[in-house]
Amino acid sequence: MDSKEVRTGYKGIRIIGFTSLMLLLIYLFFKDTYVEIGLQLKTAALGGILLIALLGIAYVICDGILVAIFAKKHRSTYTYKEGILTVWYATFYKGITFGSGTKVAQMYMLNEQGIPLGISGSFLTLNYALHKLCVLLYMSLTISGWQQHLAHSYTGYIYFGYGLNLVIIGCLVLACTWKRFHELILWLLRKGLEAINKIELYEVVEAFLVDLEKESRTFFKAKGRLIICTLLNLIKLSCWYMIPYIAYWSMTREMPPIDFWEGMALASVMNLLVGVIPAPVGMGSSELVYLMLFSSLFGKLTTDSTMLLYRMASYYLPFLIGIGVVMMRRFNKIKEGEPCET
């Protein structure tokens, strides 16, 4: 057996091994929910399922276009396809890390595409700040539509969520634009790092804040790009916010007890409150808020069904497509004989 045959056999083993790992991961990820999801898909109207799936895909595509808009400033040849693939790639890591590895995966992919880590970290932070601002803006624009449908006991959570998001956005904007705030962060950081003998991290954070300020300064000067990114974020959020209304029709073949815009408004409240209301053991924050807001309108059984369709479009389907992107990248690297960490 010559060396070429050995290399071919080795590549085949790596491909089979990686494919087996991905199949095992899919099984572990869906083993507790695939029966429920299957039942809901069999019951729901096919047209509704397809529309919900398209909305979930459209959300990720909008996110990818936003990444590309930021990246084009640093590499003029950067394409929208690269930005969309970057976000799809990161959805896999979002799934297996429950959200904590999303930005790291995007930075890794952008680095492979020729965008340095420091720069990608700065514009992804800026993009996140704009996303949070649009969540708040969307909620503010639709505030009159949901008020009558919320129990009085929830209003405290809503005000707290509104205030918490304002604080997060304020800190992000200050971190992006104000040198005095940078100095305060760096002073506190130095004190903390000196206490644990990790002072070498100081320079990393300092360089990140410098890149973040530069990125923010040029971004806010380009008013056209700011408007486009804001509109894209609002369109992106609308893709998710339409799903509960469509899911109700898909499950019952009847029009929901609220109109379309009220459904969008309630979904915007849900997105605002995710992470604010403490969830019981065994239930995620998004599931709890969804049930809290929609149960009194849709009924518990229908709400459970529509929630599964919402999670399918916003979480499960992107995760599966993300697996496909990761596998495609891995197979291409194996065929080309390149080292591959992902």
Image (cartoon, rainbow, N blue to C red):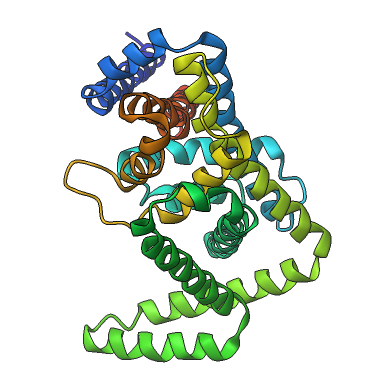
Depth check: give the residue in front, 99 or 306. Answer: 306
Which residue is found at the position 44% from the left and 66% from the top?
Answer: 159
Residue 182 to residue 109: above or below: below
The answer to whether 281 appears left or right of 252 in the picture is: left
Q: Position of residue 261 (x, y in %)?
A: 62, 40
Depth check: give the residue in front, 306 or 60. Answer: 306
Disc tally is 0
Choose top left, top right, bottom left or bottom right for residue 190. Answer: bottom left
Q: Position of residue 252 (x, y in %)?
A: 46, 16
Task: Confirm whether residue 144 shows in the render.
Answer: yes
Q: Position of residue 271 (x, y in %)?
A: 47, 49
Q: Position of residue 24 (x, y in %)?
A: 24, 22
The answer to whether 161 appears left or right of 128 in the picture is: left
Choose top left, top right, bottom left or bottom right for residue 312. Answer: top left
Residue 196 to residue 65: above or below: below
Which residue is found at the position 76% from the left and 52% from the top?
Answer: 228
Which quadrant of the rendered structure holds the N terminus? top left
Which residue is found at the position 25% from the left and 21% from the top?
Answer: 27
Which quadrant of the rendered structure holds the C terminus? top left
Q: Residue furthest right?
A: 224
